């Protein structure tokens, strides 16, 4: 039986949150502005309205 559309949406959301969590950790560990810009660009592809300077919401 195929997955329901809502299940796919939830799975995508979980995947997106996990990827953003990893990118936030890399962003915090980045030493140069160039590295930070590259990581932030990747995050923007995943989630266009992401903010790294704001506190992370749960």
Image (cartoon, helix red, strand yellow):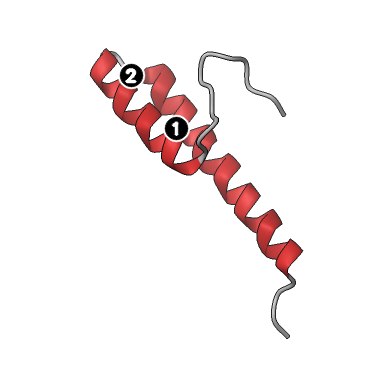
Compared across the picture, whether 38 is left or right of 29 comes to left
Compared across the picture, whether 7 is left or right of 37 comes to right
Q: Residue at x 33, y 21 (%)?
A: 36
* Place of residue 45 in the rendered image (x, y in percent of width and height, measured from the top left): 42, 41
- On residue 30, the disc is 2
Q: Residue at x 69, y 24 (%)?
A: 57
* Place of residue 24 in the rendered image (x, y in percent of width and height, measured from the top left): 48, 27
* Place of residue 27 in the rendered image (x, y in percent of width and height, measured from the top left): 40, 22
CA distance for labels 1 and 2? 10 Å
What is the quadrant of residue 39 in the picture? Answer: top left
Q: Secondary structure at mark 1?
A: helix
Pick the residue in front: 16 or 22. Answer: 16
Pick the residue in front: 52 or 49. Answer: 49
Q: Secondary structure at mark 2?
A: loop
Earlier sequence position, callout 1 versus callout 2: 1
Q: Residue furthest bottom?
A: 1
Q: Image quadrant for the C terminus?
A: top right
Pick the residue in front: 48 or 34. Answer: 48
- On residue 56, the disc is none
Asked if marks 1 and 2 touch (Cβ < 8 Å), the reply is: no
Q: Which residue is mark 1?
A: 23
Q: Residue at x 24, y 19 (%)?
A: 34
Q: Residue at x 69, y 81 (%)?
A: 2
């Amino acid at each position: 039986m195929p997955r329901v559309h809502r299940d796919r949406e939830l799975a995508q959301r979980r995947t997106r949150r996990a990827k953003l969590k990893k990118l936030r950790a890399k962003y915090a560990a980045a030493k140069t502005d160039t590295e930070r810009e590259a990581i932030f660009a990747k995050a923007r592809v995943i989630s266009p309205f992401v903010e790294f300077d704001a506190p992370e919401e749960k």
